[in-house]
Image (cartoon, rainbow, N blue to C red):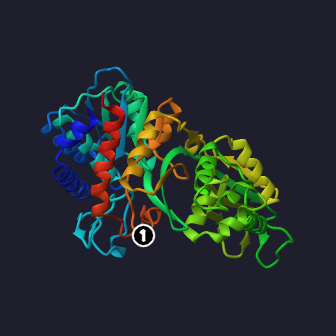
Amino acid sequence: MVGGVLTTIDWSAVQDRAQRLLVDLIRFDTSNPPGGELPAARHVARVLEEAGLDPVVLESAPGRGNCVARLPGDGSARPLLLIGHLDVVPTEPEHWSHPPFEGLESGGFIWGRGALDMKYIVATQVMTLVALREAGVTLSRDLIVASVADEEAGGIHGIRWLLEHHPDLVEAEYALGEFGGFSFDVAGKRFYLCQTGEKGIAWFTMRTHGRPGHGSMPPPETAIRKLAGAVTRIGSTPTPLHVSKTTRAMIEGMAVAIPGIEGLLEPETCQDVLGALPPEQSLMMNAILRNTITVTGLEAGYKHNVIPGEARANLDCRLVPGQSVADVEREIREIAAEDVELEIIEEMLTPPVESRFDTPLFEAMRRNLEASDPGSQVMPLLLVGGTDGRFLAERGTIYYGYSPIRFPSELKFLELIHSHDERIPVDAFRDGVKVFIETVLDFCAL
């Protein structure tokens, strides 16, 4: 059945349409804040309607649009959800080589904010539904596309709103979204990393207190001196190693091709192995192996000649699956080595999540990615940032980041996310559209 459907799909035409849709979506300025995703959601709906589907556009707040559509299956299995967000982070246009919302095709790339995060994925998902609808394929499960608002600001007007107000539209056994399926070259070996877990988020305000007074008579200890010492130690002291199931599987899998990389799993050798990796790879590996504590803001003082009695630091902490807020709080206190006061910012607290990866869907992802790039290997990935996937995983949906793309080795996929001159290679995007559709069909077709 699968092979027969694949031969009826005009891949070049599907890829052309996906490319046009990506360019169209980039041209909608959906910078969040304020978002304004409604026009983009309506455009997605028009594309789906032209293919004979029946999308619904839901406005969660004025101008905040979400589009959901369903290609029915025969009901023998529970649905597969394809989820992508329409909003993007703001830009600084003066630092771009091309205008960030022009959707320019130049030099083999499509340039623009959202080209990678994540309008190329939205375009791929939408065209998957369109291509399978037009091919007349019968699926074992409903295939749902949700193009949503507000992921970049916590999903309040997007997937979280849909789960609260319209859960029937997005309930699914499995979901595919960002980020995963991107190439990652280590020591001359190509891997594709597919997200199966996300670190949790805990934001703290750290305060220190000391004797206030006149700036001309500094006491031995001040709030600022205490804070400076704590901040310096936090920035220079590695937190303890915590290896999740996902990370262990990834590194042990890589060790078959890269002897010695398994040293990342042991406290005695981890730092030496990290130091031998290229900087961008070392940063990522370090972040997935431990709870991270990052100082993102400092505040103290109100007059030039007054010693303040309080100093404050913002801490962005990311938790490995299996770790709690109490665990990371203990690590902060041990490293700070000062009498610090810690206040958790409750509204930004989300637990870490991890989906099992011994599933038919993950195997379909592995099979199709490795077939598209012989000699490569697919590995699970613990994502260090946050996506809408965590809200689905918390409710029992098996969520994977899967948006296949073979990135040129001279470009760093993760470094272009949220950066100036965000862009995607045209050929890599087009190839990824085909691999994605093949994977969905492999998993869903009867």
Q: Quadrant of the N terminus?
A: top left
Q: Quadrant of residue 68?
A: top left
Whether residue 156 can be seen here: no
Q: How many numbered discs sit on the rendered protein?
A: 1
**Residue found at x 33% / y 32%:** 444
Residue 228 rendering spot, x and y as whole percentages? 74, 68
Residue that label 1 marks: 411
Q: Amino acid at mark 1?
A: Leu
Circle 1 sits in a helix, a strand or a loop, which is it? loop
Quadrant for the C terminus, please: top left
Judge from the rendering whether residue 191 lies leftward or rightward of residue 13; answer left or right.
right
Query: Residue at (32%, 60%) from the top-left corner?
Result: 428
* Residue 288 percent across, percent down from the top left: 61, 54
198 up-or-down from 229: above or below? above
Vertical order, 422 against 367 (above or below): below
> Which of the 4 quarters of the picture holds residue 424?
bottom left
Answer with left or right where residue 24 lies relative to residue 89.
left
Extreme bottom residue here? 216
Q: Nearer the viewer, residue 349 or 176?
A: 176
Q: Which residue shows up at 32% across the image and 49% down it?
A: 435
Badge 1: residue crowd in 10 Å (few <14, some 14–19, many ≥20): few
Residue 183 x, y percent position in the rendering? 44, 59
Tell which residue pokes out farthest to the right in this image: 220
Name which residue lies at 50% across and 48% down. 386
Image spot of residue 198 (x, y percent):
55, 45
Name the residue nearer the viewer: 40 or 432.
432
Q: Which one is nearer the viewer's eye here, 425 or 29?
A: 425
